[in-house]
Amino acid sequence: MKKDIPEKGAILQRDRETYAIAPHIPGGITDTATLRKICDVADKYQVQAVKITSAQRIALVGIKEEDLDAVWAELATTPGAAIGLCVRSIKICPGTSYCKRGVQDSISLGLKLDSIYHAMELPNKLKMGVSGCLVSCAESALKDIGIMGTNKGWRIMVGGNAGARPRIADLLVDNVPTEEEVLEIVAKIIAWYKGSTNQNRIGRIIDEMGIDRVRQEVLGKDA
């Protein structure tokens, strides 16, 4: 029986014969040349669907197994981390680059996080969301690590997820003044999680330990 092929970023589809792949598009920000290449590949290999995903990627659905290597070679890009125990995605809103409501530069911060963490192996899957204001178009409160811009800096939340047992993230720290300090705190969260013996997602760990203890372990005794 056919299965997913993680090393090729290929997810078996409902027909149990074909696969879907999703090239990595950091923050969903791309250019016309990349879009044309995706369309050309989709036409050449007669994919069944081209779908915009919730992780800000473009999935090519219905690829034959024997075509996977050729498709990736022609796309000349890396797979999005759509499967596996790793950092799956960093969802980014337009922030101050484009949105009239943005108060912080979510694109700058989000792309830096993506370059550091995308596809990093972890005890369980992990998603991040970076929103440039409290409208939170990146759905930051439903991410394992959620970051929202405010007039005073950045709000960092942990433990959110959707799925069968949805959970709203807990506030870890508020009013973080700079992008550099956010990156330092996220690094501490990831280091804490990688060192955990608990294989659950962060939200379940918080349910077991409590946010105060998690905050203390991640940020230190004086947090």
Image (cartoon, grey):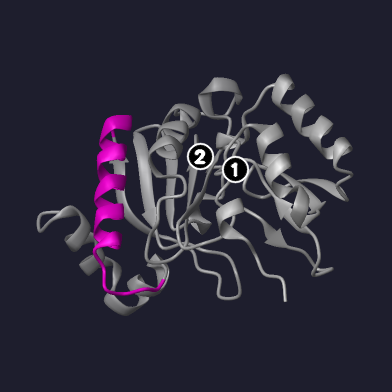
Q: Quadrant of residue 180?
A: top left
Q: Are marks 1 and 2 in contact (CB under 8 Å)?
A: yes
Q: Nearer the viewer, residue 94 or 22?
A: 22
Q: Residue at x 60, y 34 (%)?
A: 77
Numbered range of the magenta stretch: 177-200
Q: Relative to residue 174, is residue 223 drawn left or right?
A: left
Q: Is residue 78 above or below residue 208?
A: above
Q: Is residue 101 visible?
A: yes
Count how many numbered circles sit on residues in the image: 2
Q: What residue is disc 2 on? A: 131
Main secondary structure found in the magenta portion = helix
Q: Nearer the viewer, residue 212 or 79?
A: 79
Q: Residue at x 56, y 42 (%)?
A: 135
Q: Amino acid at mark 2?
A: Ser
Kindly state the secondary structure of the residue where label 1 is placed: loop
* Percent of width and height locating residue 33: 72, 20
Kindly state the secondary structure of the residue where label 2 is placed: strand
Residue furthest out toward the bottom: 208
Q: Quadrant of residue 41?
A: top right
Q: What residue is disc 1 on? A: 137
* Percent of width and height locating residue 24: 59, 40
Q: Residue at x 31, y 46 (%)?
A: 186
Residue furthest out toward the front: 66
* Percent of width and height locating residue 189: 29, 54
Q: Is residue 113 above or below residue 219?
A: above
Q: Relative to residue 12, is residue 212 drawn left or right?
A: left
Q: Within the magenta stretch, is there residue 186?
A: yes
Quadrant of the rendering where the C terminus is positioned: bottom left
